[in-house]
Amino acid sequence: MFLRIVPIGNMPKEILDAIINELENLNIKCRIMSKIGIPQEAFNQWRRQYNAEIIMNYLSNSSEVKFIDKSIPTLLITEYDLYYRGLNFVFGLEDPTKSCAIVSLARLKTEFYDEKPNKALLEERVIKEVIHNVGHYVGLDHCLHITCVMNFSPSVYDVDKKQKDFCDNCKLDLMTRGISFG
């Protein structure tokens, strides 16, 4: 599998490197593309957040953005706080029709919860959310096993409970789809 990684705005190199290292351990080849700006029409002034769906729609339909090729999955990664439809926020969102996913660092940072910065914990959380969205891309649904990377995470503490690995049931599901990670 090949995955394009596109930073939206400024993204710490250490985070991008951690994502690439982890994905390459899963035999997912990665390429970092040039960073792009965030479409301002995605900003909701009342919420002070960006609409993840508008961002992905803009990037998949924009003639200005030439790298979107639906045959190659694209991971957008940003520090902007995201929301989606009726949800207060999302850590990430994947849309298989666009072959695109987006992950936000905003609520994965310890500083968001008035705690001191913790780079290692941030990297761990981001990697879990990236793998989770790759799992959705290849067809996996949310999993009921609390430690499975595919478990739904309504809070950052639920992200912390997860492992960065697929549970045995999800691995079996991947095998039946002819997909092998790692």
Image (cartoon, rainbow, N blue to C red):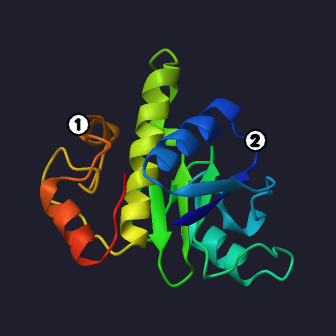
Residue drawn 46% across the image and 52% down it: 130
Q: Residue at x 54, y 49 (%)?
A: 104
Q: Position of residue 46 (x, y in %)?
A: 60, 57
Q: Position of residue 62 (x, y in %)?
A: 78, 80
Could you tell whether 5 is left or right of 105 in the image?
A: right
Q: Is residue 31 left or right of residue 156?
A: right
Name the residue furthest right: 64
Residue beneath the point at 73% across and 69% down: 41
**Amino acid on which disc 1 is placed:** Lys
Q: Are marks 2 and 1 in contact (CB under 8 Å)?
A: no
| Marks 2 and 1, the one that precedes in the sequence | 2
Element type at mark 1: helix
Other residues around mark 1 within 10 Å, as few (<14) / some (14–19) / many (≥20): some
Q: Which residue is mark 2?
A: 10
Residue 38, image quadrant: bottom right
Above or below, 13 relative to 170: above
In the image, taking residue 123 as reference, residue 156 lies left or right, namely left
| Disc on res. 161 | 1
**For residue 132, which quarter of the picture?**
bottom left
Residue drawn at point x = 72 percent, y = 84 percent: 61
| Residue type pointed to by label 2 | Asn
